[in-house]
Image (cartoon, grey):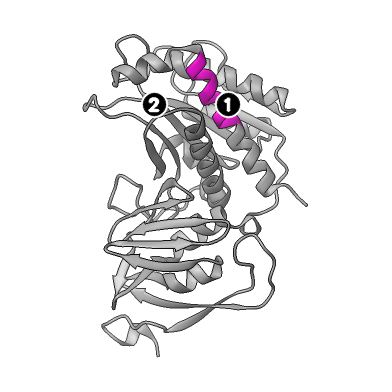
Amino acid sequence: MNASRNPLPILFLWILILTAAPGRGERNAPFPIRHANVNGVSRLLMRDLAAFFGMRQSVRDQTVHWRGRQASAAFTIDRRQAEINGTRVNLSHAVAHYRKMPMLSETDFRLLLDPILRDRALPRQAVRTIVIDPGHGGHDPGAPGSLHQEKEIVLQISQRLAAILRARGFRVHLTRNDDRFLTLPQRTEIARRVNADLMISVHANAAANRSVRGVETFLLNPANTAGTHSNRPDPRTRPGNAFDKQSMRLAYEVQRHILQKVQTNDRGTKHAGFGLLHDLPCPGVLVEVGFLSHAEEERQLGTPAWQARIALGIAEGVLAYRQAVEPR
């Protein structure tokens, strides 16, 4: 039966066959996941997805819990919000509660959950050359604080990050190593010219609400989806979308490793159509390392010790990403 012939979406229309392993193990047998079109969005039954990843599902109130030996996840019904192994991630589509059964969008399964939970879902990649992009510079100061400007703080963190990664054997290029302005095309052109394997853009945040603080890591929103802070899907496919899976895993690893180093709010991985992310020639993310509008966080961001911990967190995220994607 075809959903297009019926005004109501019908559950269990198709069987999606996946020849891949749950969790991080190996299995070659086809795995059935029930599928339906709900309100124009292709969705998968979450109970089947939990089994695919080797986890058990339970539902309490408005929360869907997955628990397994190696991983756990939690999802809020009717919201674009989840936690994977304790780290917050923001979905492209809200979890649907359809006929009393939670369903996740196929886009979120393929481009968010699968790349995070299974190394096998990621294309193999050698990671040798990294471009670090300190945001703003020159006549563009970025976010203003009471004590510091964004362009100064992110350059200092980027220089610390470059030193750590070089000591780990990576080839590292900074888009700027002093107080100069570069356009977004100039920044991505540097990554293209040096054949970068990864690009990490470092920024600091500000908000009108001065109580807001925390770290968030952005990647490009997939085609035909809205960014985290938007409800309007963007139908365009950008060059950077070629790396959606890799950028998702990189964002997740960077976010969780920073939070292991500094005590602040987890604002999660987020999707956005930032210009820098549009034309990336490689996997890449934009990291917001804190809020200069928050008095205590601004003070911390200005200290060498805090900067070193953030830089180490980003570097360890890169190392975790490399371990996941390196050819075996």
- Crowding near the residue tagged with mark 2, few <14, some 14–19, many ≥20 C-alpha atoms within 10 Å: many
Does the magenta segment cover residue 145? no
Q: Tell me the distance, in whole angstroms, between the alpha carbons under discs 1 and 2.
A: 15 Å
Q: What residue type is labelled 2?
A: Gly
Residue drawn at (29%, 47%) of the image = 230
User: Picture quarter containing residue 283?
Assistant: top right
Mark 1 or mark 2, which has the lower sequence index?
A: 2
Q: Which amino acid does label 1 sit on?
A: Leu
Q: Which of 111 and 266 is in front in this view?
A: 266
Q: Is residue 322 among the parts visible in the rendering? A: yes
Tag 1 secondary structure:
helix
Q: In this view, does 62 lie above or below 161?
A: below
The reply to whether dot 1 and dot 2 touch (C-beta < 8 Å) is: no
Q: In this view, does 295 lie above or below 83?
A: above
What is the span of residues highlighted in magenta in the rendered image?
A: 305-315
Q: Is residue 291 above or below residue 97?
A: above
For residue 328, side relative to residue 177 (left or right): right
Residue drawn at (21%, 28%) of the image = 209
Residue, disc 1: 312
For residue 112, side relative to residue 63 (left or right): right
Place of residue 99 in the rendered image (x, y in percent of width and height, measured from the top left): 29, 78
Q: Is residue 190 among the parts visible in the rendering? A: no
- The N terminus lies in which quarter of the figure? bottom left
Residue, disc 2: 290
Number of the label disc, if any, that sits on residue 228: none
Residue drawn at (51%, 44%) of the image = 252
